[in-house]
Amino acid sequence: MRRGRLIVVSGPSGAGKSTLIRQALEAVPELAYSVSATTRGPREGEVDGRDYIFLSREEFERWIEEEKFLEWAEYSGNLYGTPEAKVEEFLDEGRSVILEIELQGARNVRRKRPDAVMVFVRAPSLEETRKRLQGRATEDLEALELRMTTAVGEVAAADEFDREVVNGDRKQAREDMIRTMREIIGGN
Ligand code: 5GP
């Protein structure tokens, strides 16, 4: 069986990555999602094992020592990492796997797995990014500013990626994302 593709989806916080990924997963059955581990606390509605594997810092550090991560990074004061075993399992089954990760992690995956396809998702403007982050209202002001500063740096990284999806018009972005995933899986 042909192995699946490793697909990294990255881009500034507030760009709408999660929604577009969910829509792509619903529309394209060959896709699988890699559930990350994090030391961040669960947000309302988030389920352990589905949205993230929620770990204490000690547990996360143990996983690092045990080399369980394909990549990991610190972001806004928390640790995030991609457990490697599950990713390999999906790829062996011929399914393509989406990693939704921030920029440092994306760079690490590209270095380790040059055959990974890198997809950048961004909002049409930074103003729009701020609005979306404020609308989410899960962060206090300081955390929001930190995410905004990080987002400014992240937009500049777009040209390190193979593909770009601009999340302006929701319907258009959904179609672009789904088409991009189908092209990647099909080998275009
Ligand atoms: P949030 O706290 O908003 O869920 O995620 C913060 C950032 O961490 C997002 O940019 C998200 O893509 C990224 N992230 C989530 N999981 C991972 C992971 O496993 N590795 C890395 N490097 N970043 C991740």
Image (tube, grey):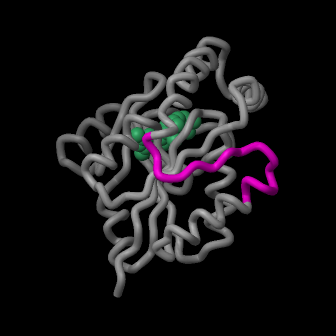
Residue 74 or residue 61, whichever sits in front: 74
Which range of residues does the magenta coloring cover?
A: 160-174
Residue 63 or residue 126, whichever sits in front: 126
- In the rendered image, the quadrant that contains the N terminus is bottom left
Q: Report if residue 170 lies within the magenta region.
A: yes
Residue 48 image point, x, y percent: 52, 50
Residue 103 image point, x, y percent: 44, 36
Q: In which quarter of the image is residue 124?
A: top right
Instruction: Kindly identify the residue that appears in the image at 66 percent across and 17 percent down.
Output: 140
Instruction: Kindly identify the residue that appears in the image at 62 percent across and 37 percent down.
Output: 43
Instruction: Kindly identify the residue that appears in the image at 50 percent across and 71 percent down.
Output: 188
Residue 77 or residue 3, whichever sits in front: 3
Residue 132 or residue 173, whichever sits in front: 173
Q: Quadrant of residue 95?
A: bottom left
Left or right, residue 40 beside residue 17: left
Instruction: Kindly identify the residue that appears in the image at 80 percent across and 50 percent down.
Output: 170
Residue 106 image point, x, y percent: 40, 43
Quick check: 152 above or below 38? above
Quick check: 38 above or below 74? below
Residue projecting furthest to the bottom? 1
